[in-house]
Image: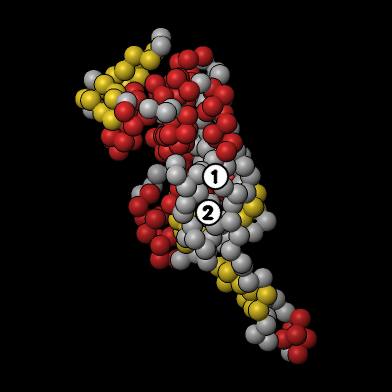
């Protein structure tokens, strides 16, 4: 009736692309994890998939302790942290570019493993002689472990803060989980492995996604959002999102 027409709910339009999400969910192929894709110039989140999941129109019976559905109620992109692995080398690389003056003249030797202090850091294969750019291109663990130890824990701590990884972002009012690090745990061994994204590194995927956007966009990225707009039954628009940017997360030169 008229009361419902004038006082009813609004239509909610999201930035999400269902086809992209379906492709991402299929690509996960049963693995636990998350896929996030966003437009770093506008902030629109195109894909936000978290697995495992289930069809809410046909919910399964989930018994306590059933590992098949471990974390099924968590949005892993926004509300979880993960050991980042080699994706974290982008942060170590940014720190090295800013703090090691001869970084472009350096070479690294990788024989499949590298002695760093009292620990041996292994690689997937022997990379041979590498420049810094080579080391990033082939994701050499040994090189980035050495760089982290050379720069020290305080520089690494500075850069996870500076690059926004430890920030809590707001996605239409939903706060992201904060990444956490301990570069002093386990001494030089822990620091070496932290430089390659292992050790005590725990990164929120959304914060890493935003940093990658900043690296692609000259140092600042659009803040991500999910809600495109709402529209009343009368066609009145509200909550139309405006693009907002982060602070500078990385210098344009870096």
Q: Is residue 51 visible?
A: no
Label 2: element kind? loop
Tell me where residue 50 appears, x and y as whole percent: 49, 50
Residue drawn at x 53%, y 60% is: 43
| Image quadrant where residue 138 sits | top left
Label 1: element kind? loop
Residue drawn at x 35%, y 19% is: 121
Tell me where residue 219 appears, x and y as whole percent: 50, 49
Name the residue tied to disc 2. Answer: 221
Q: In the displayed structure, does residue 109 sit left or right of residue 12?
A: left
Q: Nearer the viewer, residue 254 or 209?
A: 254
Asked if marks 1 and 2 touch (Cβ < 8 Å), the reply is yes
Name the residue tied to disc 1. Answer: 249
Q: Nearer the viewer, residue 242 or 34?
A: 242
Other residues around mark 1 within 10 Å, as few (<14) / some (14–19) / many (≥20): many
| Image quadrant where residue 204 sits | top right
């Amino acid at each position: 009736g008229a009361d419902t027409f004038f006082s009813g709910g609004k239509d909610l339009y999201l930035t999400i692309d269902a086809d992209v999400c379906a492709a991402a969910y299929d690509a996960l192929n049963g693995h636990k994890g998350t896929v996030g894709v966003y437009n770093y110039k506008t902030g629109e989140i195109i894909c936000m998939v978290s697995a495992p999941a289930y069809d809410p129109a046909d919910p399964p019976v989930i018994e306590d302790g059933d590992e098949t559905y471990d974390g099924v109620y968590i949005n892993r992109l926004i509300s979880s942290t993960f050991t980042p692995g080699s994706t974290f080398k982008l942060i170590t690389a940014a720190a090295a570019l800013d703090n090691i003056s001869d970084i472009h003249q350096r070479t690294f030797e990788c024989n499949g493993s590298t002695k760093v202090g009292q620990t041996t850091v292994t690689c997937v294969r022997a990379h041979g002689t590498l420049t810094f750019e080579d080391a990033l291109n082939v994701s050499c663990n040994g090189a980035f472990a050495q760089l982290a130890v050379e720069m020290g824990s305080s520089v690494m701590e500075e850069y996870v803060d500076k690059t926004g990884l430890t920030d809590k972002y707001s996605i239409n009012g939903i706060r992201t989980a904060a990444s956490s690090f301990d570069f002093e745990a386990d001494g030089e061994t822990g620091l070496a492995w932290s430089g390659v994204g292992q050790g005590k590194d725990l990164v929120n995927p959304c914060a890493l996604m935003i940093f990658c956007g900043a690296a692609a966009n000259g140092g600042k990225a659009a803040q991500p959002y999910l809600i495109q707009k709402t529209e009343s039954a009368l066609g009145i628009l509200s909550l139309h999102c405006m693009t907002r940017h982060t602070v500078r997360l990385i210098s344009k030169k870096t």
